[in-house]
Image (tube, rainbow, N blue to C red):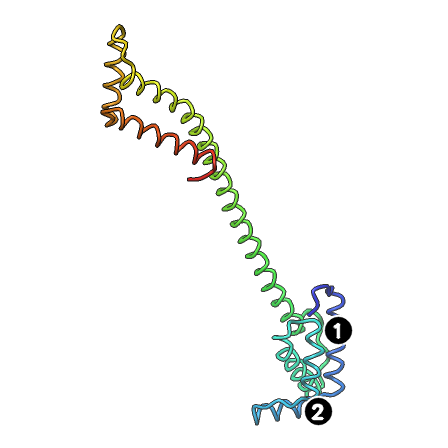
Amino acid sequence: MSENMTPSDAKVIREQCRAYAAEHVAELSAELLEWHDTSILCDGKVRELARMCSEFVDKSDALPVAKSMVERAAMMVATNHKPYSNENDPDVAWTSQSGFRIAKLEAQLAETREQRNRVVETLTKELNEYRERETRIKGILGILEPLARRTLWIAFVWNDHNFDAAHKYALETAKKYDIHNFNEANDFLDKCDAIISSKKDGKE
């Protein structure tokens, strides 16, 4: 079935298929009987009608539609029945059901796309918030690193005893973070430098 086919085009082709079924009803009926008896459908007029039907229905549905048309044409001949109107035409009803299934699938697909878009929107928002927090953390680290360096310098290097209170307070602060000597102070500052450098390089 062509994606660009309009309903009016489909109707024209459907009428052509009906006319073909009515014109060759005897040969088509014989092929259906043989198919029923042998479970083998020859490459004849029924398959030709199915190829015609595939112009307005999916290929997987073309053969069932062709079979339905042949059966209807045969019954109309046998009963001298008048042609169906569009209101009670089983082919029209089948096409409507097929269209309904397609519309339902399209609606489900649209809903899935909306859900995907909502997920992407949420993840994008969370990523932006994470980047903002990371920027703030970089700024805080940039401030804390020199403060830590100055505090540890006062604790383990500065030897001006005129400001002994500042020295003692800095030393107590360092010990709270398990920094007890000059070497441990340098190790701590080296770790700070490594963290700040990794943040600047975009590494974790």
Which quarter of the rendering shows the N terminus? bottom right
Q: Residue 42: x and y, percent?
A: 64, 90
- The span from disc 2 to disc 1 (Cα, nearest Å) is 21 Å
**On the image, which quarter does residue 68 sit in?**
bottom right
Q: Residue 38: x and y, percent?
A: 57, 94
**On the image, which quarter does residue 109 sit in?**
bottom right
The secondary structure type at the circle numbered 2 is: helix
Residue displayed at 59% across by 58% down: 106
On residue 168, the disc is none
Give the vertical position of 66 relative to 30 (above or below): above
Q: Residue 67: x and y, percent?
A: 64, 82
As drawn, the residue found furthest toward the top would be 162
Residue type at the position of mark 1 = Ile
Give the vertical position of 68 relative to 114 (above or below): below
Q: Could you tell me if the residues under marks 2 and 1 are in contact, i.e. CB atoms within 8 Å? A: no
Residue displayed at 74% across by 84% down: 22
What residue did someone put label 1 on? Answer: 13
Give the vertical position of 84 relative to 79 (above or below): above
Residue type at the position of mark 2 = Glu
- Nearer to me, 161 or 13: 161
Give the vertical position of 201 relative to 36 (above or below): above
Which quarter of the rendering shows the C terminus? top left
Of callouts 2 and 1, the N-terminal one: 1
- Nearer to me, 127 or 149: 149
The secondary structure type at the circle numbered 1 is: helix
- Left or right: 190 as drawn, with respect to 47: left
- Left or right: 8 as drawn, with respect to 99: right
- Left or right: 98 as drawn, with respect to 52: left
What residue did someone put label 2 on? Answer: 27
- Left or right: 34 as drawn, with respect to 147: right
Residue displayed at 27% across by 7% down: 163
